[in-house]
Image (cartoon, rainbow, N blue to C red):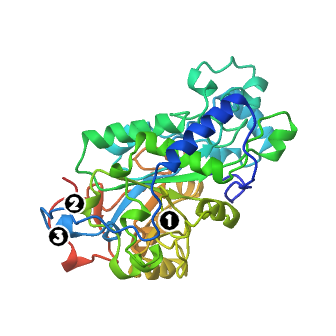
Amino acid sequence: MRTTSGSAARTRPGSVSPPGAKARRWMASAAALAASVALSSAAPAPAPAEVRSAADGLRVTQIQAMATHNSYHREAPFAEQQLMAKHDPNFRTLLYSHASLPVQFSRQQARGIELDVFPDPDGGLYADPLIRTGAGLPPQDDPDLREPGFKVLHWADFDYRSSCVTLKRCLTQVKTWSERHPGHAPLPVLLELKETDPDMEARGGAKSPPWDTAMLDALDAEIRTVFPDEATVTADDIRRPGETLGESVRKHGWPRLSAARGKAMFLMDNDDQELQDAYRAGGRESLQGRVLFTDSAPGRADAAFMKVNDPTGANRTVIRNLVKQGYFVRTRSDVPLDQASSGDAGMLRDALASGAQMVSTDFPAPGLAARYGSDYVAELPRGSGPVRCNPVTAPGPECPRGPLER
């Protein structure tokens, strides 16, 4: 998520697939895989798995965990920072780095991540960033940057450094960790679908192809090459016969931990309605056959996941009301670099008290904010472990004793 302008990067869905022979082969392969997924307007929920413990009886919406924001992000070197300062007066908000994804899960107790995704059907579109060239640095030597497939970076041609440069590489790291820890709570993976910056384009930078339905089909297909349907929680797992996804969430709820342990769930960060319409096109109003949950609103057919990034003020009550209705909500505990500079944990307290199930931070471990003059860290209360009972949907007596992960 780009934070320098205070808003998410724009997304402009289009209608024309990108040209090029490699692109056609890549898109055709993705379309063939996507077509193999049976679409059902009322897919039945799977039979419930055996409940081994009281914790297994909790629903996905009855737990709460910390996640990381821009989870792949690595800070630019000083040579690039000097150019950043000339282009963006808020460039200091980009000066942070995250550990690799497996380290975040194992050492920092993160149970959710965010990835910014750019389409690259021909390969090589983001391999030679303008700022790197301007800083006099040598070309990048990662061969995966030249291959077709979705790339993970923050701001093309400007803030591009990533601990895992391709979506497939990032997801493979998540899947490998998941297989080694099969008792983990479901891992939400928030994807922001990005486009290139017009200002960078005008300077000779990359221009991303549009996020049209074909490109979104390719995204689903690429996710499924790493996470097959049996390793994910999707709308098809929730929706009941004769009901929309939103109706099923309200009436029956999300799956229980007994059925969701060891799995991932993919969430679309974008609230752009044209982009969402392209994703729901072709009779998929309730996300039939889709991998991602869209950022929705109560009353919509696709209503299951909602994003309320600011948990302060009146929004704290807004989030509490949403989670009480059975929705899965993502919020944030800090924004770069306000809390890290001030040490104020008020936003974190509001986020945790709101009951949002996914609380994202840039500072998941002690010491990360020290360079900004504070000891700020965003963690669950001491003794909670990586996951705790949700204070709104599973308070006090409703919370089983013992760890929630196996």
Compared to residue 142, the image places residue 311 above or below, namely below
Q: Is residue 150 visible?
A: no
Secondary structure type for disc 1? strand
Between 341 and 395, the one lying in front of the other is: 395
| Real-space Cα separation, disc 1 to disc 3, in angstroms | 25 Å
The one nearer the camera, 186 or 140, is: 186
Report the Cα–Cα distance between label 2 and label 3: 8 Å
In front here: 276 or 348? Answer: 276
Query: Which numbered disc, 1 or 2, marks the residue that appears first in the sequence?
Result: 1
Check disc 3 and give the amino acid type. Pro
Amino acid tagged 1: Thr
How many tags in the picture?
Answer: 3
Q: Quadrant of residue 86?
A: top right
Kindly tell me whether residue 399 is visible in this rendering. yes
On the image, numbered disc 1 is attached to which residue?
331
- As drawn, is 212 to the left or to the right of 240? right
Horizontal side, residue 207 vs residue 177: left or right: right
Out of 58 and 91, give the one closest to the viewer: 58
The residue lying at 87 percent from left, 40 percent from top is 202
Assess disc 1: are there few (<14), some (14-19) or many (≥20) residues with their C-alpha within 10 Å of its C-alpha. Answer: many
Q: Residue 80 at x, y = what percent?
A: 71, 30
Marks 2 and 3: CB-CB under 8 Å?
yes
Q: Residue shown at 50%/43% (left/top)?
A: 33
Three-letter residue code for mark 2? Leu
Query: Which residue corresponds to the image point at 66% horizontal and 36% vertical from the top-left?
Result: 120
Real-space Cα separation, disc 1 to disc 2, in angstroms: 21 Å
Relative to residue 240, is residue 139 depicted above or below?
above
Q: Which residue is mark 2?
A: 404
Secondary-structure class at tag 2: loop
Question: Disc 3 marks which residue?
Answer: 400
Residue 281's disc is: none
**Disc 3 element:** loop
